[in-house]
Image (cartoon, rainbow, N blue to C red):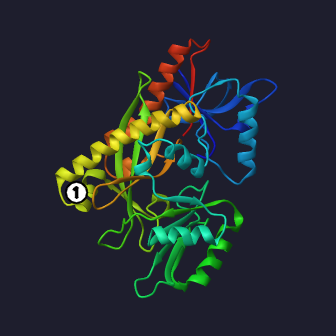
Amino acid sequence: MSCSYIHVYDTRVIVFTPADVHVSKDLIHAMVYDVKSGVWSRKWRSFPNMIYDRCRIQRSQRFQQLLRFRARYDHLTFLNRPLRNKWTVHQTFSQRSRFRPHMPETLLYQSSADLQRMLKVSPVVYVKPINGTGGRGILRIERQREGKSLFDIQGRRQSRQIIAPRKVSLNRLETIVRQWCISGKFLVQQGIPLRLPSGRFHDYRMLVQKNGQGDWEFTGMAGRVGAARSVTSNLHGGGHAMKAETLLKQWLGSEERADKAMRAAEKLGIEAAAYLEDSFGALCELALDLAIDREGKIYVLEVNPKPAREVFARSGDNSTYRKALVRPLEYAMWVYKNKNTPSSSKVVEE
C-alpha cells in the first residue's frame, strides 16, 4: 500500500494516506479493521499525535502531497525520519573507521573520468541512482579478460525491464553511462563478487528494529537470489528468498564460517543503525542490504529505513516475519508511554 499509515489506538489499527486527511477538521477518513468481522471499512478518526511515516521517495503527485503533509504536521511525534540519499549515507558511514572497511569504493558520477577511475579500482562496477529502490536504474559493468577496452554491460531500467548482457568498447560504454545518468544523480560503485555457481547474483537483507524497551535489536536476515539475467537480487524484480544460514553455508563452504559471518553481520547492523540514528534523527527500524564475499568479508550495499518484510515469509521464516511486524508496534507503545502523550495513539505505515 503506497504512502499509507497504520495508526494504533491501543489495540485498534487504522490505515491512512495524506489524501485521507481533512485538514480544517483535523480528522482522517481512514481504513479501520474490525476484529470480529475481519473486515476493513472507512471511518472518521481524530488526528494522531504519533506517526510512523513509511512512504518512500517517488516521482509522483502523491509524493509531493506527502511532502506537504510532512511539513504541515512536522510538530507531531514521528517514530522515524527519512534518511538522506545513498551518497550522503555512504559519506556518513565513511567518516567512521568502524564502518569504512565495510563500504564498497563509491563515487558520485559527474563525468566519464569517475567511471574510468572506478574501473581502475575494480573489474566490476555498478552504476546506480542515488535515490533508487527495488533494483531500478542499475547498470552492471564488467571488464572482459580478453581485452582491456572491452566491457560486458547489463542492467535493469527504471521500469524493472532487464537489459540483456552485451559487449561494448570503452568509448561506447562511456556514451551509454552518460545517457543513463542524464536523468538524475548516480553513483559509480565497486562491484563485490556475488555470482553463484548458477550464474545468478545474490545478497542478504538484514533487519534491525527498536524493541519494546526502545533498544536496537537484530530481528533477522534472509538471503536473496536474483532472477536469471538480472544484475540485482530484488524480490520485486523476480528474485527469490532463502534462509540466510542455508545460502551462506553454500556460499562460504561451511556452517562454521556461515555462523561467524552471521554474528559479524548482526553486530555491524546494530552499530550501524545506532550511528545513523545519531546522524539523521529518530529511526524505528533499518534494513541493510549486505554483500558477503567468498572470504566472509561484509559490505554494506544500501540501507533502507522503510523496509518491506516479505523476504522472511518468502524464505519460510514465519517466526521472524511475525516478529518484524510486531516490533514496530511494541516500540510505538514504548515511545507513547515514555513521552506521556495526551492520547493513546501510535502510527505505523505498511
Determine whether, in the image, residue 13 is placed left or right of residue 110.
left
Q: Nearer the viewer, residue 50 or 305?
A: 305
Q: For the residue labelled by badge 1, is the local secondary structure a helix, a strand or a loop? A: helix
Which residue is depicted at the point 54% across and 40% down?
350
Q: Amino acid at mark 1?
A: Lys
Q: Is 346 rendered above or below residue 234? A: above
- Look at the image and tell me whether residue 11 can be seen: no
Pick the residue in front: 51 or 80: 80
Measuring from the top left, give residue 252's x and y in whole percent: 24, 59
Outermost residue on the right side: it is 24
Residue 44 coordinates in the image, percent (x, y):
69, 27
Provide residue 162's location: percent of width, then percent of height: 53, 73
* Image position of 144 (left or right of 64): left
Does residue 342 appear in this view?
Answer: yes
Residue at point 27%, 56% (across, down): 248
Residue at (33%, 60%) from the top-left corner?
293
Q: Position of residue 250 (x, y in %)?
A: 23, 61
Q: Specify the farthest residue to the bottom.
A: 146
Q: Nearer the viewer, residue 96 or 41?
A: 96
**Which residue is at 50% across, 72% downward?**
119
Q: Which residue is mark 1?
A: 249
Whether residue 51 is situated above or below residue 203 in the rendered picture: above
